[in-house]
Amino acid sequence: MLLNLFYRKANEAFVDENYDEALKLYTAAIENDSTVAEYFVKRAQTYIKLAKYAEAEGDAGQARSLDPSSPKACLRQGVAQFHLEKYKDALASFQTGSQLDKADANFSQWIEKCKAKIPDDPEPTKQETAAETKQDTQPPAASIPQPPKEKQRYDWYQTESHVIITIMIKGCKRETVDINYNQHTFSATIKLPTGSDYSLELDLAHPVVPTHCVTRILSSKVECKLKKEEGIRWNKLEGDDSLAAASSVSKDDTHKHPTSSHYSRNWDKIAKEAEEEDKQDGVNDLFQKIYADGSDEVRKAMNKSFVESGGTVLSTNWKEIADKKTEMKPPDGMEWKNYET
């Protein structure tokens, strides 16, 4: 009973993104019974979240020893090895996992990532082999401390038909973002400005429809919109959520973020506001481009109309506004008020 309590509480902490607490609880479960492979698999996943890839590799290897038929152990070990730049080892782990679970497309995607990292090196010459042998006899150089990895955050909310995962990384380019949707898993790999990779691996609480999932790369975030296979409320993003299908939830509650907070939010409303904000960002980008590419007269027109109208009008026609003051035109249903003293 105590052991199950440790494991259950660890899962709850993990879902709440309290990874340090989850790590302590998974460790307590392992200390009570070190023969359960799933405990090592989950602690390996927690280590990955904390960017402790060497520890994750060790735990996943222990899980594979306890249960050689566990595809998740292969996946966790492969992900850890990939981040440790052990691409050949990672490839072998993913290939083994793929044989154990042929239906999981996640393995094929990771296999392609590994192959892209492994160069097609020619056979080494005798001179190169001799040089490597000589180098091996030299004393090892002092290890250079690596800067701590920047911790990135993500959030999620849901509507009746979709789950939206928002990754809070600014300035991403499409070629540096790799998002993979599968029925039961979600993975994201994003190249950070520092040159390192941000990785997010999720075992989804409920199935989604991969072909209807959409990725939007915005200036301030990466938004991933997952189509629910069933129109039910998710109580969790990851892990076991067996209560979701049986729960009776009002329509209003369906639109609230499933957290343990003592307050609730209407996430449909927030989603709509976010869409409006993104549209406004797009309009602003367009205006900036027009200003940058425009002639001197276009720029003068934009500056004059914007200032004189209190930001309610933006004209590019200098001949039309050059000899008259631009009137204020607030949006429909609103009125202009001057608050200056």
Image (tube, helix red, strand yellow):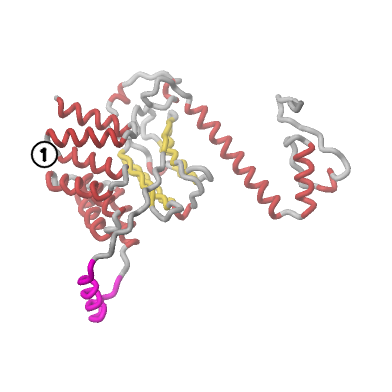
**Residue 78, percent from left and from top:** 25, 52
Q: Is residue 217 above or below residue 95?
A: above
Q: Position of residue 243 (x, y in %)?
A: 29, 24
Q: Residue at the spot x=30%, y=39% of the render? A: 203
* Vertical side of 10 occupied by 86: above or below: below
In depth, the one of 43 and 116 nearer the eye is 43
x and y percentages locating residue 28 in the rendered image: 18, 33
The structure residue drawn at horizontal position 54% and vertical position 31%, both measured from the top left corner, is 272
Which residue is at the front of the view, 63 or 107? 63
User: Is disc 1 placed on a helix, strand or loop?
Assistant: loop
- In the rendered image, the quadrant that contains the N terminus is top left
The residue where tag 1 is placed is 35
Q: Is residue 336 visible?
A: no
The residue lying toward the viewer, choosing from 14 and 341, is: 341
Residue 122 horizontal side relative to residue 279, left or right:
left
In the rendered view of the protein, which quadrant contains the C terminus? top right
- Please give the range of residues in magenta: 121-139
Q: Main secondary structure of the magenta part?
A: helix
Residue 93 drawn at (x, y percent) = 22, 54
